[in-house]
Each structure stands twice: as C-alpha cells, then as structure tokens.
Amino acid sequence: MSEDGGRSSEARGRTDARWCSEAGGRTDARLDLAIDRAVRELLDVEPPAGLRGRVMQRIDALSPNPVASAFGRKLAWLALPIAAAAILVLTVLAPWRSAAPAEVPPRLASSAQSEPSEAQGELAAPRAVVTPPVPPVTPSASRRAPAGPSAATPVARVITPSTPLAVPAPPDHEVVAAVALPDAAGGIGELAAIAPIAIANIRPSAIISAEISIAPLPPLAEVHIAPLSPPDRRN
Amino acid sequence: MPSIDRVNAADIADAASAMDHALVRRAQAGDVEAFGELVERNRRAVFRAALAAVGNPTEADDVAQEAFVTAFQKLAGFRAESSFKTWLLTITWRKALDRRKGLTKWMHRLAGPASSIDTGEEWDPMDRIAAGGQSQEDGLLTSDLQRRLRPLIASLPKKLRDALLLAGTGEHSYDEIARMLGIPVGTFKWRVSEARKVLKQKMRAMGYTDV
C-alpha cells in the first residue's frame, strides 16, 4: 500500500473513531434524557386534593392534645411496670396475711404451758403458740338465726379459764390445738375432738464450750552442725 | 449566572426551612392549624417520595396521610437537628417501605397503567408524552423509549431504583435524600449513576445504539 493510501486510511480511521465516539456520546445523552423523562413522567403526579383535610381529620380523631400529652404517655409507660410489680407483690403476700396465726387468750396459753426446769446456762423453752380467736356469741344472735338446717348460724364459744381442757398437757409438751364445745341450743354439731398436737420443747444445747487446755510444746532438741572441713569450704 | 442561581436556591431553601421551624414551634405549643400549614407546604414532597416507593397514587396517598399523622404524634420529639422536611421525609420513607413490603407485584403496577383517585380513569403517563407538542416522529421515538424504559426501571434492583426515582422527583436535594435513606451522599450518587449505567446498557442491548 502506498504511503498516501496508508495516511488516508489512518485519517479515515481517526475520523470514523471520532464519529463513533461522538455518535456514542449523542446516544448516551439521548438515553440520559429519555431516562430523566421516564422518571419524571412516572412521578409527575400531583397529590390528591384534600390531603390536608384528611390529615387534619385523622389528627382530630386522636386525643385532644397529643403534643401536650406526650409527657403523660411517658409517665404511663413508667407507671405500668411499677403497678404490675405492686400487684404481683400483693398477690404473693395476700395468702400469707390470711394464714397468719392470731392472738390466743393469755389464760389459755398459761394453763397449757409448762416450763422445763433445766440446769443453769440453758435457755428457757418458748411460750405457747397462739390460736385463732373465737368471737363471742350472744343469746339473742342465736335466737335470731332462721329455722332450718341449711340456714343454721354457726355458733362458737369462748374458751374461758373456768372451762377445763379435755386433754391434759404432758409436762414437756404444749398443746396447741383447741376443742370446740357443743352448743346447747342445737346449732351446728359439735366438732370431733382433735387429737392434741404435741410439740417437743426446743432445748438448745449449751453454747459454752469445754475448756481448752494447751499443753506446752516439748523442748526442741539442739541441732548441731559440724563445721565444714577446709577442703569443703566454698571460696 | 449559575453561581447566582445556586445562591438563590440556597437562600430559598434556608428561608423555607426557617419558616418550617417556626411552624413546628407553634405546633409543638399546641397550635394544630400550624401543623396544617406544614402539611400544605410539604404535601407534594411527601407524596412523591411515597410514590417513588409504592408506585401507586392511591397507596402513596395513604402512606402520606400516615406519615403526617405519625409526624404530628412525634412532634414533641423533634429536636431540629435536621430540617423538618428531612425528618418528615425519613418518616415517610419508612412508612412507604413498610407498605411496599406488603405489596405484591410492584413491578406489575409500574409496567401497567395506574388508576387515578379523583376521576377513577386509568392513568397512563404515556398520554402526557403524546400531548407534549413534539413532532410526530420525535413523539413516536420518545414514546417507544419511554415505554421500553418503564419495565426496565421496574426491574432494577430496589436500591438503585429507589435512588433513581427519588433523584428524579426534583423535590429533594441529594443531601436530603441521603439522610432520608440513612446512607452517605457519595453512596447515593453512586447508586443513581449505577442505575443510569445499567439502564443504558440494557437499552443498547435492545438495539438503541443510535437514538
């Protein structure tokens, strides 16, 4: 190929390349334009009329002043767990409070009690356990009870000091059970005698320990170390 | 001249932000009408952000309402660390994404005509292109491109598509959109650029080499 032909073909190549890049650039630009228009067309929609009115209606349907009640809502969030914890504590404690032993008439306790006699230094036995109180019954209350077995009003009696116990207390034990006496008016039937529950007195052991004697140590034997012979001495 | 335009645009944005903050303070004090004014000023931006996510004007309207109501309920917690508009758009975007998760066939909606709320007629954005006043040949060519581009835009990965559509609304700055999406501005710009690149590659593959 002649040089003139070569130079013209190179020139044509450069022109072609430039044309391609320019054409590609134009294509790119037109594609960009098409993309922009497509996106704008997709989103060029006016919001429906009345959006403000609908929003305000929904806001009016909320609480009167939700902005001002934000603090109130925060307080509610704090109060809820505290209230739940309080209810839980009350639920746990309620059975204990209903099952707590009540006071016993002091005379009843003193008649059943017997203190053990122990040597000096020992602790005294504990006093009697209290029993539930028995409310006093008036004769008028029992007469006002309606007739009929199902409507019978339960009647109880206070155990007075003059009324002896049915069961003698053993010397080392205390009786913690009570017996209901039958009602002469014919209310509820007398309760069956309850076997006494004897509880052994607690006798704690002495806390004074025996004397501890310390014998002196035997004298230590003397330790004699022979001196090193001159050749064994270290320098 | 461009520098003057940029300065004016910045001044306008600052003035709008200051106005929004004044209305927010009044609304926080209990003035509900002030919040109504905020709704009016930001309804277009909120609606279009929602539309970019859900692709349907009816659902975008629902999302916009929910976003405004939620913003009202949380107004006491607005600290003015960012502009009110950015804060509102962040709420809107979260609501829109929640709605989109429950939507099926979003691409189908984008590819097909959407329904208009006011008239109940079928909404076809191609009608606007036909009425644009171009030459018949240009109109046909552009219509063809638009028609081809819509399903291609719908088929983009979600992150690229969201970035491209939000950038195309013209209502938000890149900074606002980046804050709304919770990503750096550079990442957002890359996503827009990548979305365009993918679309152009697909268009060339379809034969649009000399448009």
Image (spheres, coloured by chain):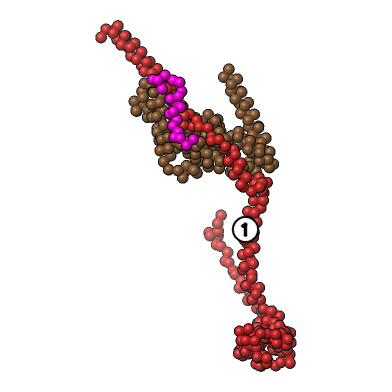
Q: Nearer the viewer, residue A71 or A40?
A: A40
Q: Which residues are magenta?
A: B119-139
Q: Is residue A121 above or below residue A57?
A: below
- Mark 1 lies on a secondary structure that is helix
- In the picture shown, does residue B132 fall above or below A106? above
| In the image: residue A24, left or right of residue A194 | left
Indicate the colour of chain A: red
The answer to whether any part of residue A18 appears in the image is yes
Asked if the stretch drawn in magenta spans residue B129, the answer is yes
Q: Colour of chain B?
A: brown
- Residue B144, how many percent across, how many down? 38, 26
Please tell me how crowded label 1 is: few (under 14), some (14-19), or many (20+) other residues with Cα within 10 Å. Answer: few
Which residue is rendered at x = 53% and y = 59% of the image?
Answer: A231
Residue holding disc 1: A81
Against A46, residue A182 (above or below) is: below
The amino acid marked with disc number 1 is Pro
Q: Which image quadrant is residue A51 in?
A: top right
Q: Is residue B81 visible?
A: no
Say which residue appears at 59% left-offset and 38% top-offset.
A52
